[in-house]
Amino acid sequence: MCGIVGYIGHRNVSDFLIEGLNRLEYRGYDSAGVATFDANGAISLRKRAGRVCELSEAIDRDPVEGTVGIGHTRWATHGKATDENAHPHTGGNGEVVLVHNGVIENYASLRGQLQALGYVFRTETDTEVIAHLIAHHLDEQIKLGGEPESEDTLLKAVEVSLRKLKGTYGLAVLFRARPDLILAARNGSPLVVGVGPGEHFVASDPSPLLGYTEQVVYLADHEIAILTADRLDLRHRDSGRLSPSVQTLDQVSADIDKGDFEHYMLKEIFEQPQTIENAMRGRFEEDEATAKFGGLNLTAQQLRHIDRIVLTACGTSWHAALVGEYLIEEFARVPVEVEYASELRYRNPPLTDKTMVFAITQSGETADTLAAMRECQRKGMPSLAICNVVGSTIAREADGGVYLHAGPEIGVASTKAFTSQVTVLTLLALYFGRMRHLSYQAGKRMINNLKALPEVVARTLECHDAVQEIASRYLGMDNFLYLGRLYNFPVALEGALKLKEISYVHAEGYPAAEMKHGPIALIDERTPSVFVVPRCGIYPKVISNMEEVKARKGPVIAIACEGDREVADVADDVIYVPEVDEYLQPIVTSIPLQMLAYHIALLRGCNVDRPRNLAKSVTVE
């Protein structure tokens, strides 16, 4: 949640900040603001509720100058989306200015203490507490003999303040007394520092840095970066100086452009043949009819020791984990549990060192998933990650794992990450299966089917025009049911989530057989049911469920295999997809549901890339 950018160097800071905030706007778009040092060393603030474009227009009317500054695009946690609550926030009498991503859990008590000391609060945010707290401790350091412009004095004020905060933060801080300095700090909220000749950058993720620098340093929890134009120093809040570990970005700037597509979401839907292929590249061991992974960091003997797997995730990644449960249990015969990370982190389930935990996350920064993984590691369970973002916190802290290689996913509603996650989970099912009982011939068949999958998905995308036409007939409906069985039950959940996320239409996903245990009461002429019904072992039973809906005058949209006339005789509308083996159906059947949500949202006038109340990376609890 929230996006932070900062720059110190020789460039026009305003241009970089606005471009960076546009690239980070998927993290939050309630309000935006910048703070810069002008030529006279004074700090200029510009803040606006609304989108980054509104801030940009305000800066065009009233420009800011200079080569040092910080910026922020907000996803509101404390306080409404107003000009006053927009970041940056000032502390004391303006001697401290900062931007913040995260949540300060003890802000109310700190606010009361600071008000008692005479500090005046002008916003409803928890962030203003940090600004005043740093200003207060800066004043205390000066009273003890510290020089106001001394780097040591400023750093000490920040360190003392951070120790008093409970919660999460990613911070970029300016000081009126030092226009040649930015301090950045993190605990639970991601920050990356970009390194260039005569300049340094800071951002919530690498996307604003693409095209500016390829050298980055990922901050870890409790680390503080001291940035000048020519110098990067790294400190731990408690233990002192550190040596920065500089890494090279491996992404290209084209990944964050929409190209010829109207929206990122549509672009990412159509990227799926390539992203699925990327998820599989180099991961087949054909001679052994199995998959291979270079990052699990466990020996074959250790893996055979595992007698239980826990998949933990949130949102769309949780739906992918449900597919993974079916896959691993079918092919590897290992018991699998799927846990919401937000629940697992506070539970005390009976897990042992024979339990393997996979944390599944697109961003690698999801706060609940990170906390759940850390809790499992604390109890001695091998904890691995399935993650898309190289250098993310979960990727760095996991005992091992698998990257998706899907490229940046900018649309808030996840599409290509879901199918990439399911692809990787299929490879893991093959890998664990071949270690146990799966035959060589079965392994070869799985490999052949997986290698054909990108072409199958490319054919699936050909349903786009048909989906667009069907969407136009249902855009006025306010309630949908999504129904599927076995491998396609998680697809029903994911399809319902996509519709809710971007079109604000109420939708629920259920196993099709569960419909008559309650949800059938909702069926009427204004409640469409979307059935995911490709050919499978219980196909006739799903057809019977469709008949039950039709008998109650409910409209039916069906996702079915090419050439299926039986479904066409029952459903009002059919979207056809290529026929694949059951275990691969979730990858194929999820795509028309992504398109259906996209087109209904578009027709209803919704912003599909920036849905209300949502942000891409959920870095707060």
Image: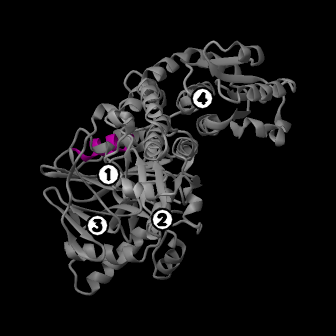
| Residue 370 in the figure: left or right of residue 184 | right
- Residue 347 horizontal/vertical position (percent): 59, 67
Judging depth in this view, the residue of 518 and 108 nearest the camera is 518
- The secondary structure type at the circle numbered 1 is loop
Picture residue at 58% right of the left edge, 26% below the top: 602
Q: Look at label 4 and name its amino acid.
A: Leu
Q: Quote the CA–CA distance across marks 1 and 4.
A: 31 Å
Left or right: residue 216 compared with residue 528 = left
Rendering coords of residue 518 (x, y %) = 83, 42
Q: Which residue is mark 1?
A: 391
Q: Residue type at mark 3: give it.
A: Ile
Mark 3, mark 2: which one is toward the viewer? 2
Q: Quadrant of residue 100?
A: bottom left
- Residue that label 2 marks: 376
- Discs 3/4, front: 4
User: Looking at the image, is mark 1 or mark 4 earlier in the sequence?
Assistant: 1
Task: Residue under label 3, please give it.
Answer: 224
The kind of residue on which mark 2 rests is Cys
Sequence order check: which comes first, mark 3 or mark 4?
Answer: 3
In the picture of the structure, the residue carrying the numbered disc 4 is 593
Q: Are marks 3 and 1 in contact (CB under 8 Å)?
A: no
Query: Is residue 258 at all visible to an observer of this figure?
Result: yes
Farthest residue to the bottom: give it. Answer: 144
Q: CA distance from mark 3 to mark 2?
A: 27 Å
* Residue 13 among those drawn in magenta: yes
Residue 25 part of the magenta segment = no
Looking at the image, tell me whether mark 1 or mark 2 is earlier in sequence order.
Answer: 2
What secondary structure is marked by label 2?
Answer: helix
Q: Does residue 108 appear left or right of residue 67 in this picture?
A: right
Query: Over which residues does the magenta segment extend?
Result: 12-22
Residue 48 in view: no
